[in-house]
Amino acid sequence: MKKLFLALFLCTGVLGQAVAAGGGAAWDKAPNLGTNMSALQNGAKLFANYCLNCHTANYVRYNRLKDIGLTDKEIQSNLNFLTDKVGDLMASNIDPKEAKAFFGATPPDLSVIARSRSGAGGSGGDYIYSLLRSYYRDDTKLTGWNNKIFPAIAMPNPLWELQGQREPIYDTVTSHGHEVKVLTGWKVVKPGLMSEREFDAAVGDLAAYLTWMGEPVRNTRVQIGVWVMLFLGLFTLVAWRLNAVYWKDIK
């Protein structure tokens, strides 16, 4: 439990600067894919291939992915590249000290990142969906990357091969008597392996998976809650009629 609180604090502390640093940039709405097993499985594949290189998910075991329709064999063959046990925790490929030296901060654990980023700007899935689609090339930064949602972000674009490389297009407008630059679009510098539509769909799957990973029992909890509400509604009707029958001869 102590480690879980530490992870929540780390995620909130390191990534919680995003809203302040981003000047309140609006988040896009992520697609609702929480019950789509195919989307969750694709998101898990993207997570294992592109996120676990630097980040960890030390509060989730690989075999928990059976809840989204994968078998032990599929998990071990396609997602677990570090250990030979499907019951192991999701560790990172990179040494934490090396990561801190390169990025300036230790990459946070992502087990509950979606839950930690839920707020006034939207859900944690909305934040992840917006962040990963807002990268652009910036040679003034050490990593060569910047982000509209999280300016001066330490993490380079993990999905650049899929998205490609682009530069921002600014337009100068007058606001309160001052000229300011406003981001109006993107210029593609180098195409990626996916089209824009395909990339948005892939990021939607990844955001859905990270949201699911933060609370794997959510779908079950919601289903149980629906049945409980139906039972209470039916029981209320029965109790109301029993009460009427009990008191009918009493004046």
Image: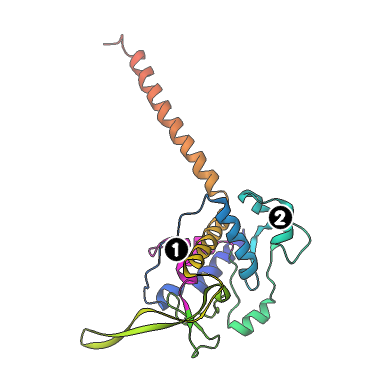
Q: Is residue 171 above or below residue 75?
A: below
- Per the model, the C-alpha gap separating discs 1 and 2 is 29 Å
Please give the residue where the numbered disc 1 appears in the rendered image: 126
Instruction: From the top left corner, tell me how far across and down residue 154 is, in percent.
Output: 53, 80
Q: Which residues are magenta?
A: 111-135
The crowd level at tag 1 (other Cα within 10 Å; few <14, some 14-19, many 20+) is: many
In percent of the image, x 52 and y 58: which residue is there?
Answer: 208
Which residue is under mark 2? 74
**Residue placed most toward the observer, 127 or 137:** 137
**Residue 88 shows in this picture:** no
Identity, as a three-letter code, of the amino acid under mark 2: Glu
Find numbered disc 2 in the image and state the secondary structure of the residue it sits on.
helix
Say whether residue 60 is magenta.
Answer: no
Residue at the spot 38% in from the left edge and 63% down from the top edge = 120
Q: Amino acid at mark 1?
A: Asp
Judge from the rendering whether residue 91 lies leftward or rightward of residue 137; answer left or right.
right
Residue 89 in which image quadrant: bottom right
Q: Quadrant of residue 39?
A: bottom right
Q: Quadrant of the C terminus?
A: top left
Quarter in which the N terminus is drawn:
bottom right
Q: Secondary structure at mark 1?
A: helix
The x and y percentages for residue 98 are 67, 81
Q: Residue at x 45, y 68 (%)?
A: 130
For this view, does 86 lie left or right of residue 159? right
Residue at point 38%, 83% (across, down)? 169
Mark 2 neighbour density, 10 Å: few (under 14) some (14–19) many (20 or more): some
**Residue 127 covered by magenta stretch:** yes
- Relative horizontal placement of residue 177, taking residue 34 as reference (left or right): left
Question: In the rendered image of this protein, does residue 133 appear above or below residue 65?
Answer: below
Number of numbered callouts drawn: 2
